[in-house]
């Protein structure tokens, strides 16, 4: 168990998905997972660990996504993860606004067409 368990599980599952083999787990790895949680918080650390395994940075890929680089870069990785999430959320809001505009314009156009047709008769 311990502080880093959820983060380890996210890391291990994402690692297995990417490399088709389970990552090594030992005392050092457990200590690193605990550090990641201490630095990022229990809510975000597991998400950032998953994000790390999806990251295609050359150094990460060459190291086979070593936990040492996860802990070294965890704040920066968290910023990239959070920014990506923010961009996705913003795009969703923008899509919602665009659809609301389309719906509003469709109503105005329909009103204008009704007026034109009414005047033509």
Image (spheres, rainbow, N blue to C red):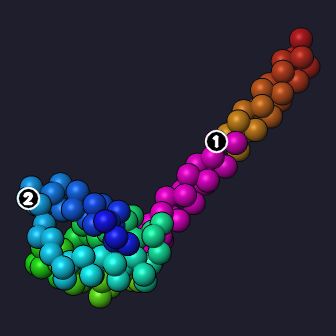
Task: Out of 1 and 81, give the one closest to the viewer.
Answer: 1
Picture coordinates of residue 103 (x, y %)? 70, 36
| Residue 45 figure quarter | bottom left
Picture coordinates of residue 91 (x, y %)? 54, 56
Numbered mark located on residue 57 in the image? none
Q: Residue at x 89, y 17 (%)?
A: 118
Q: Give yes or no for contact between labels 2 and 1 (Cβ–Cβ under 8 Å).
A: no
Please state if 32 lies on the left or on the right of 3 as rendered.
left
For disc 2, the marked residue is: 21
Please state if 103 lies on the left or on the right of 82 as rendered.
right
Task: Out of 61 and 2, give the one closest to the viewer.
Answer: 2
Numbered mark located on residue 99 in the image? 1
First in sequence: mark 2 vs mark 1: 2
Relative vertical location of residue 54 with respect to residue 92 in this rendering, above or below: below
As helix, strand or loop, the secondary structure at mark 2 comes to: loop
- The image quadrant where one finds the C terminus is top right
Residue 67: say if magenta.
no
Picture coordinates of residue 68 (x, y %)? 21, 84
- Which stretch is magenta? 77-100
Labels 2, 1: front one: 2
User: Furthest residue to the front?
Assistant: 1
| Residue 22 figure quarter | bottom left
User: Furthest residue to the left?
Assistant: 21
Picture coordinates of residue 66 (x, y %)? 17, 78
Residue 84: say if magenta.
yes
Residue 101 visible from this viewpoint: yes
């Amino acid at each position: 168990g311990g502080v880093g368990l959820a983060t380890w599980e996210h890391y291990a599952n994402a690692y297995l998905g990417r490399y088709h083999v389970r990552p090594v787990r030992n005392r050092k790895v457990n200590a690193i997972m605990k550090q990641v949680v201490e630095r990022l918080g229990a809510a975000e650390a597991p998400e950032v660990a998953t994000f790390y395994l999806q990251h295609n940075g050359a150094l990460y890929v060459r190291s086979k996504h070593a936990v040492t680089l996860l802990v070294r870069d965890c704040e920066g990785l968290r910023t990239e993860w959070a920014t990506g999430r923010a961009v996705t959320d913003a795009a969703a809001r923008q899509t919602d606004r665009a659809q609301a505009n389309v719906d509003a314009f469709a109503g105005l156009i329909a009103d204008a067409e009704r007026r034109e047709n009414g005047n033509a008769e």
